[in-house]
Amino acid sequence: MIKVGIVGGTGYTGVELLRILSTHPQVQLTAITSRKEDGMPVADMFPSLRGRVNLAFSSPDNAKLTECDVVFFATPHGVAMAQARELLAAGVKVIDLAADFRLQDIDAFEKWYKMPHGCPDLLKEAAYGLVELNREAIKKARIVGNPGCYPTTMQLGFAPLLKAGVIDATHLIADCKSGVSGAGRKAEVATLFSEAGDNFKAYGVSGHRHLPETLERLSDMAKGKVGLIFTPHLTPMIRGMHSTLYARLTTEVDNAGLQKLYEDMYANEPFVDVMPFGSHPETRSTRASNMLRIALHRPDNGDTVVVLVVQDNLVKGASGQAVQCMNLMFGLDETTGLMHVPVLP
Amino acid sequence: MIKVGIVGGTGYTGVELLRILSTHPQVQLTAITSRKEDGMPVADMFPSLRGRVNLAFSSPDNAKLTECDVVFFATPHGVAMAQARELLAAGVKVIDLAADFRLQDIDAFEKWYKMPHGCPDLLKEAAYGLVELNREAIKKARIVGNPGCYPTTMQLGFAPLLKAGVIDATHLIADCKSGVSGAGRKAEVATLFSEAGDNFKAYGVSGHRHLPETLERLSDMAKGKVGLIFTPHLTPMIRGMHSTLYARLTTEVDNAGLQKLYEDMYANEPFVDVMPFGSHPETRSTRASNMLRIALHRPDNGDTVVVLVVQDNLVKGASGQAVQCMNLMFGLDETTGLMHVPVLP
Amino acid sequence: MIKVGIVGGTGYTGVELLRILSTHPQVQLTAITSRKEDGMPVADMFPSLRGRVNLAFSSPDNAKLTECDVVFFATPHGVAMAQARELLAAGVKVIDLAADFRLQDIDAFEKWYKMPHGCPDLLKEAAYGLVELNREAIKKARIVGNPGCYPTTMQLGFAPLLKAGVIDATHLIADCKSGVSGAGRKAEVATLFSEAGDNFKAYGVSGHRHLPETLERLSDMAKGKVGLIFTPHLTPMIRGMHSTLYARLTTEVDNAGLQKLYEDMYANEPFVDVMPFGSHPETRSTRASNMLRIALHRPDNGDTVVVLVVQDNLVKGASGQAVQCMNLMFGLDETTGLMHVPVLP
Amino acid sequence: MIKVGIVGGTGYTGVELLRILSTHPQVQLTAITSRKEDGMPVADMFPSLRGRVNLAFSSPDNAKLTECDVVFFATPHGVAMAQARELLAAGVKVIDLAADFRLQDIDAFEKWYKMPHGCPDLLKEAAYGLVELNREAIKKARIVGNPGCYPTTMQLGFAPLLKAGVIDATHLIADCKSGVSGAGRKAEVATLFSEAGDNFKAYGVSGHRHLPETLERLSDMAKGKVGLIFTPHLTPMIRGMHSTLYARLTTEVDNAGLQKLYEDMYANEPFVDVMPFGSHPETRSTRASNMLRIALHRPDNGDTVVVLVVQDNLVKGASGQAVQCMNLMFGLDETTGLMHVPVLP
């Protein structure tokens, strides 16, 4: 059994880790920390876990995290980098769901996250946790930087086109829509039910923290600098993310050829579903599961390809992906404990 | 492996059966019928099942239902009673999610459902599928009438008080609120998003079909005629049911004593959670799981007990409960394939 | 023109006052205070008011409230009582949307609101602002305590029965459901979209602040002590309130007679709509309007009357009602500026 | 007073016309037709109108539409064209909210709407009802083809850029999100609460009927053939539309210059609000009002302009715009009866 610790278990990625890990056949939940809720049974905060998770929150100081095999950080940016070194020294693997180990470009990190990076050496060895694009590195990693939710959809959606070199990589557009849970479980006016409900808006159009991470990765794929317009929107639903991606073909490829690029790349992927050409995937078709679905369109047979990508932002976009990484890091079948069927309706 | 057939797989209880049964370790999905969608892959209608359910709908005429071990009817009232005899004759067990085998009082059935009952003899042998109150009969049954969603909450909520004989059974009140999925997957104006969204209303206050079923069962518990005001309401959420029950004490019992009645009755029940006295259970704490939660209140220490009951109307209120019955009918552990952790948020 | 000041304009009752008053033909919006947002144009916080309200928030210290004809307090409990005396002395009328002037029983106020009452003498002269039940007093008042949202529905719903003396007033039940905006525009986890959405729960079952206010008023009507079980619930909609009231008849009245009690009492009321016997009013039929609708039921012709009451909690339940009071206090037609047609869908 | 008839008053654009027209100071509602609901009081179908609209639906055959001054068609495509000639002959003006008089290109109409056009001569004289771009023609028109909801946002959003000739008009992208009421009040599975709620999806990516109308108009502005990728999405909210438009600059214009293009064009428009550069308009800031708001962005100061446009799809996107046209056609101030303040929250 893998002994698992979770730092910061009171947010949405934390409770989603608990939902997934509490039925994972190879995991023993060992410690969940929260400075503020020290001593409170986890199931008192999240009654959905009554009878299923018997741990109490413990103070980060007392939690015996070094006795775990792996620790997940479901914390704000900056926490994991402060604690990773000690854990690694004790032989504990680290999976950070925040941004501390996502960006290899430290300047970009410091610019966008407005804090110095505490351990550039560890960053260098960290693996980026987007399994489908980085599986081998993750298997061997001690530290994983779990991708952002938006970047997961943008990378998996653009990858086949970029790797094939058939689009103009300097003018990509990603029009992305997220459910409100992506904003986290923080007391804020903007995400109140009466503010975010029955309402739709863009935000961060002039710059969002998921942009540099995505640019870094897409540029790797394109083997050159990529230009990307990224427009996130807040959607009145709890879970779910829908990214609508636009790219212009620079090489003539017919529709069957486009479809084949995707089917070939994701042929053996258990969590990426390439739907028939011209499909309209719904976010709910992935709800509470680790699936991500993709469909291609080519309006009027012109030179613009439209790629539709859906996932559950808390699962494939966060906690499920993190568990997928854990499975690889411990030599398990990648799908272990992750085969939830999406909840519909 | 239990070979399972589903008649009428295109509604919400049908797709929920598929979600649950597709990961049930002892089940082999064998046939799913829909006259209208004959030949269509199930996953084309419900993309959430892509890669997880590979069956296609078949016409009821051709589906080899008699080769199944058990057939679930997720159909309108009247269908199961027409087909049950033939299936039973072939040794197939029957679980009906509609009302055909719920009411022992045939007159009441014919009055409320406005159709003659096709097989009164089978009705007599049918077991009412509310496991916690009828477990032994279900184990031995060939036919189970799965309870309605509202009746499940009302019976489990009132049972400890009625069986203890401490309340006035002639004046019970059940103020119940259901998510919209309870109305089914039928094209109707009243349940459109733009009609049912951001809106709340009562319906059927002067009479709802779940009333006679509940009265029959509560009267059995009370060993006498019960009086019940039942007010159903439509709530702008997809899944979830919250019943607020009111009863007046006729015997002095203190709060600890009330709580003990519930804890004793449900002590060993895997799917009934008695929360601490004075709790406020949320519907989402049961979302997509087979759990039902109960909490007791006694305002101002007066003679009125308020019982709060929550469940997912599609799981414990329908398809999950049906699978719980199936497990018992086939000698399996009752929880097999039903230990989903509720999805929160 | 009536010069109007609003203290505390950043919450939902504040912005709703602004929506209503900005098109009121007899009102000149003169001052809106917010200590925190001093200097910020109101329309920067609420873009719905761009081009319609040109005021900026001003600090309470500098706002020339004493130059107004009337000041609305859309503030937390305790603020109005601290400022009322000075305003009244300057000849300014006061309408408080919080609880400072609702309860005549000072002990009850201090018990439920956990603060001493600052001006018992003013409380004595304050009129309770439920127009349909207290119109004459409001016309002459200098101070109005605007009713709570729940109490408005409970009082207008029970009044005809209580005044006619046909029910058992010692065992009333009010099962009430509110939209989330009733909780205000405060940053809190419990009312986040991802917490309150797709979810239903009771709260405050063991005691809610709207109980003593309601008991005081119902007891007046009943000319004797009333017993009331009041169960508030949080509903996943933004606006709207639905109260389901239960009472037992002590005198034989037939359905037509019951209906007549309501139609007679509310015959000339512009904002109370008695629907046909057996109707199911929807909250959205009052959305963004000052209407309150009532319908009666009598299940199985027994001795229990079920009264369904709907309103928009922010309008008839708060800001609309306050403007209705203002109209009366200044000798205007009661409906001036309040004839918005409900927004459906 | 203008005598108004409405053909097809049972859908959302119909009830929205009733909401607006019932308080319009110059309108006398004269006839509302529905073959199916002949004789039913309008307020029985829409209780929001109780006491405000006293008409009953009448059969189209009996409704004395020729006695009206203007008739609105809130009907499916094809109805207005069948009845317009007779009405015009009787001196009645016609405003069609469907597509019969939107497209000047008859081939395009017949291709996209799959029906022959019944009166090409009338089409030729019809004015396209997008007031801000076609005011003078509307003033003189006997027939108005009211624009589609999506086309309204796309035209008003792209117009300043196209007219200034500063963008590449051959590669425009419009990523549009609509509330569910845009799909109308038809009984359909796809727009049930339990299907469209908590869910997000694109639809019609390979071709939507609003495309040819938009192309025709944008090409006029650009004085040349325009290329447009138009991706509509269904959003889990009742009302509201958010269009995110992308265009590439071909001429260097700085941000102030871009902003000035919009502010100049819409300086005197009562229903178009150009927000400060870099704003993020919310759909709810226009809810239940005739306002449309626009904001500009230019990510990373590159060559892509992002234009955000919001409106209420049922008001500026449909019925409000139609009343705005009526006002012009009858020489009234354009804003008469249309100055509703948006409902927030």
Image (spheres, coloured by chain):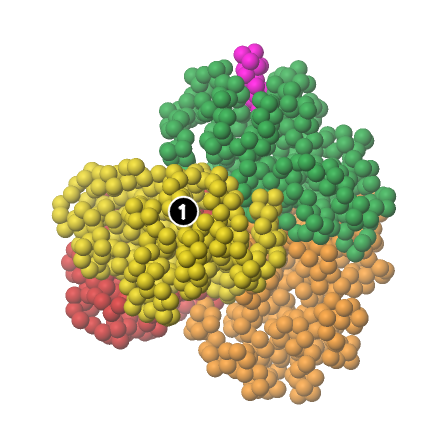
Chain colours: A yellow, B green, C orange, D red
The residue nearer to you, when weighing A17 against A271, is A17
Judged left or right of residue D27, residue B268 is right
Q: Is residue B39 magenta?
A: no
Seen in the picture, residue C80 relative to B98 is either above or below; the reply is: below
Judged left or right of residue B195, residue D125 is left
Q: Residue at x 46, y 79 (%)?
A: C40
- Mark 1 secondary-structure assignment: helix
Q: Residue at x 18, y 51 (%)?
A: A167
Q: Residue at x 70, y 40 (%)?
A: B157
Residue under pointer 1:
A326
Res C216 → quadrant:
bottom right
Res A331 → quadrant:
top left
The part of the chain drawn in magenta is: B79-95
Name the chain letter of the residue that bears numbered label 1.
A
Res A341 → quadrant:
top left
Q: Residue at x 60, y 62 (%)?
A: C183
